[in-house]
Image (tube, coloured by chain):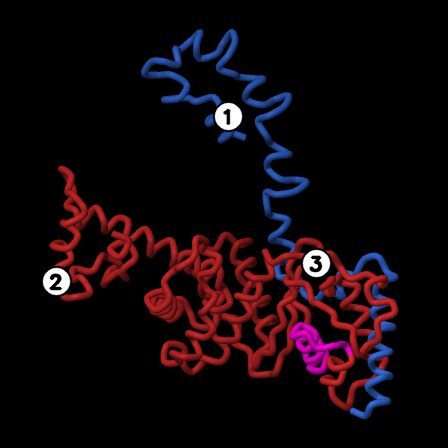
Amino acid sequence: MTKSTRLIITAAAIAGLYAGALTTSAYAQEAGAPAQSESKEKASCKGKEGCKAKESCKGKEGCKAKESCKGKEGCKAKESCKGKEGCKAKESCKAKEEAKK
Amino acid sequence: MLQAVIRPLGPGYRSRRRWPDGRPATVVIDTFAAPNPRLSGFERIEIYNRMYWFRTLDSLHEDLPGLRAVLGERRFMRLIEAYLVRHPSRSFTLRDLPARLEAFIRRTSRLTAPHTALAADMAAFEWAQVECFDAAALPPLTPADVTGVPGSRLRLSLQPHVRLLALRYPVDEFALAVKDAALRGDASNAVVASRRRLSRRVRRPRAAPTWLAVHRHEGKIYYKRLDAPAHRILTALRSGRTLTQAVATAGRGVQPDQVRAWFTTWMHLGWFCRR
């Protein structure tokens, strides 16, 4: 490569640096092929429609609200948690209701 | 104790009955592991010995789906068992486990022949993804950083997460095909055995020089094909050459428009960072 060609190519590279800096974000196609395919990401629990967001026990109809151990019909009243058939041992509210959902 | 836990397993994935020096392992292990009412000292340590090996084997199994597809399950397991005997984990994290696999494959070609070159390329490619995943992303270069600096003195740094590869096989396409096949298997509720068949059904690629950049963009890993001169320029920049020296490595056939387009894209993708 001659000196003048090298200078022209260097100038082109610098022009490219400026041109690239002027645009705020890259197009996805410029990035190449994604390592993780779309379908796998969609199936993931993480994100907008993840398990947590959609069917969490927390909230209006969550375990706590509906069949909490604490309260009128809770384990304490009916089947003491401390005994053989307590929440933890047999029918833990959290575990069971989460599994159902 | 550590030696007893990390020593290689014997036939049937059980602890070896002999210590490396030839003594019965029970004799050695009984000196530091007491028996309990149900298990001898040897049997107690065997639980940890097997756990250690299954965890490390499992980690490599998970990190290297492409290499599994190249070799098939049985040869892959033989390879990684031999690899772990030679290079046991020395790090606090299993992330580092495949770091020396490419070199090991090239050194011990009998384990991968006749696909040694392809297997080594795939190991390098999959390791690059591990590195890319958690390598740093430094503040990107701005026009202000280069303004007024002549090309003969301008040195550009590449983001640590950009990994450059010069390969003999197009392993990127092969890896994507393997993943697609595995996903189809998942979608059809296929059992594990069928998934294995699926991943092996993907035809091994023919040799074709391939230049790749594995990089992170908006939190995701991408593989980007590069032209050979572009790969040379980036490699030269990474090694600390000036911009003028780096573009000179591109060779004669390169046109200014091409170079301009490459640099625009790389800047776009934030590949350059401050030194």
State which chain disc 2 sits on: B
Chain A tint as drawn: blue
Q: Amino acid at mark 2?
A: Arg
Location of residue B39 in the rendering, given as x and y in whole percent from the top left corner: 16, 43
For mark 2, what is the residue?
Answer: B23
Mark 3 or mark 2: which is in front? 2
How far, Cα to Cα, is label 3 from label 1?
A: 40 Å
Are labels 2 and 1 assigned to the same chain?
Answer: no
Residue B71 is drawn in which quadrant?
Answer: bottom left
Stretch of the chain drawn in magenta? B226-243
Location of residue B31 in the rendering, given as x and y in whole percent from the top left corner: 14, 50
Of the two numbered discs 3 and 2 on the same chain, state the one appearing first in sequence. Answer: 2
Location of residue B263 in the rendering, given as x and y in whole percent from the top left corner: 79, 72
Q: Could you tell me which residue is drawn at 24 percent across and 55 percent down?
A: B4
For mark 1, what is the residue?
Answer: A97
**Relative to B56, is B44 above or below?**
above
Considering the numbered disc 3 on the image, is that residue within a helix, a strand or a loop? strand
Q: Amino acid at mark 1?
A: Glu
Considering the numbered disc 2 on the image, is that residue within a helix, a strand or a loop? loop
Residue A34 is drawn in which quadrant?
Answer: bottom right
Q: Is residue B169 visible?
A: yes
Which chain is depicted red? B
Along the line of sight, the residue nearer the viewer: B176 or B209: B209
Q: Could you tell me which residue is drawn at 61 percent across and 43 percent down?
A: A46
Location of residue A26 in the rendering, given as x and y in whole percent from the top left corner: 79, 60
Q: Which mark is residue B217?
A: 3
Along the line of sight, the residue nearer the viewer: B149 or A90: B149
